[in-house]
Amino acid sequence: MNAKNFSSLPLSTEMVQNLNAIGYTQMTPIQEQSLPYILEGRDVLAQAKTGSGKTAAFGIGLLSKLDVKKFRVQSLILCPTRELAEQVARELRQIAKFAHNIKILTLCGGVAFGPQLGSLRHGAHIVVGTPGRILKHLSKESLDLENLQTLVFDEADRMLDMGFSEEIEKVLEFVPKQRQTLLFSATYPEEILDLSSSVQQDAISIKTTTQEVANKITQRFYEVSGEQKIKTLINIFSTFKPQNAIVFSNTKIEADEIASKLQKSNIDALAIHGDLEQYDRNDVLVQFSNGSSRVLVATDVAARGLDIKELSMVVNYDLPHSLETYTHRIGRTARAGAEGLAFTLYEPWEAEKVEEYRDGERLFECAGDLKISNGFSMTPEFITLVIEGGKKDKLRAGDLLGALTGDAGLAGTSIGKIDVYERQTYVAIEAKLVDEAQKRLSGGKIKGKKFSVWIL
Ligand code: ADP
Ligand code: MG
């Protein structure tokens, strides 16, 4: 038996079969190293790079000891942002498919409180949420953690970065002393050890080497003067032709500027930063993740929690403030074994600062060697349609797919990602067919109801 197979662990046959069915045949290094301890019930402090499969590591752990018949909250997962919490919940639901009726609930800020009360009244086995909102429910006694078995801190480093320590401390007052506590983090600053010693007991500490993943990211650096930066960025795109890219800027104003300059050069780009309302933010994230926008210009804060699968390129438009930030940023590309490209621009006056990046592997190249191709453009494959209806109208992805493809409608292949939210649904449609799709959806009924539909 291969030691990397999930079947080498003390897991139920159903659990292993389902993992195989969702394509998890071999454990990732962090899973291989942490799961034996997690399944023993030990507290574990684990560090591994973004994209290394940490969610499944704690997910398999908490799900395998869940008592489905006992309809009480048995696990709580704290995450830094709503996007991350939703992503964790999605992944857990996949892993939870080995059993029926496991109820997983997300409780995050930035969304209405009332409906969450309703969901909590219906009960849940597992709660995933952001510290502030979880604390609010605990203080109002709408959430009861008396039966909690497992407490997870996911992306603990980012939670601390975002100043959640106070909320975390208060949440702990509502949690049973007797529990398993798992702490996951992509980086390992001093504060993580402090957090660990205050929330964990006799924790096993696991660090996976980052070598394996890091090697798959080709990192290039270019020295350019300020006014040459946009041109260099465009030349990077035209030389390396990424499917999509995130461009990091150090300031919000610059993020907007870069996006608008790219648009003027026929490169489809959107900016995202902390000043956007949650709704606008969601619009931007959906468009980028479903291929309706190929370049996202972001500040670090705005990009927190953003997880895009298959990101081909990360560009640091400015030299990041620290190596730590740099590692965080470029770790977003090269997920799940795919090769990633990372680029960093720095100005001549930063030449000294950039020295700390030289490690023999990172490539320092001349911007003049990049290909200059006139007339280069990056247009999106898809355009997003918004349907003014969602989960609360019991809409499901299948309903939209049916409405679009039924009665000699669009081919299934011209429809991309479908994201169903509480009150809205986003459907990615092959760009040239978007008008036809809009006509179909707004003309007919979906689930016997008319919905307004517009192009984002
Ligand atoms: P992290 O939290 O470490 O950043 P994730 O838990 O989000 O990483 O996992 C990254 C990706 O790897 C996800 O798409 C997940 O579905 C996938 N994944 C996790 N474990 C496995 C596995 N054992 N085999 C294949 N894919 C996996
Ligand atoms: Mg994660």
Image: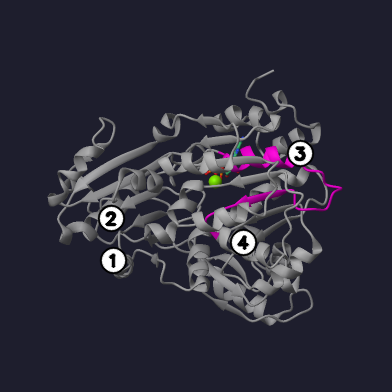
Determine the residue located farthest toward the top in the rendered image: 1
Label 2 element class: loop
Above or below: residue 209 compared with residue 100: above
Q: CA distance from mark 2 to mark 3?
A: 46 Å
Tag 4 residue: 135
Label 4 element class: helix
Q: CA distance from mark 4 to mark 1?
A: 35 Å
Q: Decide which of tag 2 and tag 3 comes sooner along the chain.
A: 3
Q: CA distance from mark 3 to mark 1?
A: 48 Å
Where in the figure is residue 350, as x and y percent of width and height?
16, 49
Disc 1 marks which amino acid? Glu
Question: CB under 8 Å between callouts 4 and 1?
Answer: no
Tag 3 residue: 65
Bounds of the magenta span? 53-81
Whether 413 is among the magenta residues is no
Nearest to the observer: residue 393 or residue 290: 393
Q: CA distance from mark 4 to mark 3?
A: 25 Å
Where in the figure is residue 188, as x and y percent of width and height?
43, 39
Tag 2 residue: 317
Question: CB under 8 Å between callouts 4 and 3?
Answer: no
**CB of mark 1 near ligand 1 (< 8 Å):** no
Q: Decide which of tag 3 and tag 1 comes sooner along the chain.
A: 3
Determine the residue located farthest toward the left in the rendered image: 349
Q: Nearer the viewer, mark 3 or mark 1?
A: 3
Where in the figure is residue 141, as x and y percent of width and height?
72, 65
Would residue 453 appear left or right of 309 to someone viewing this image?
right
Q: Quadrant of residue 433?
A: bottom right
Q: Decide which of tag 1 and tag 2 comes sooner along the chain.
A: 1
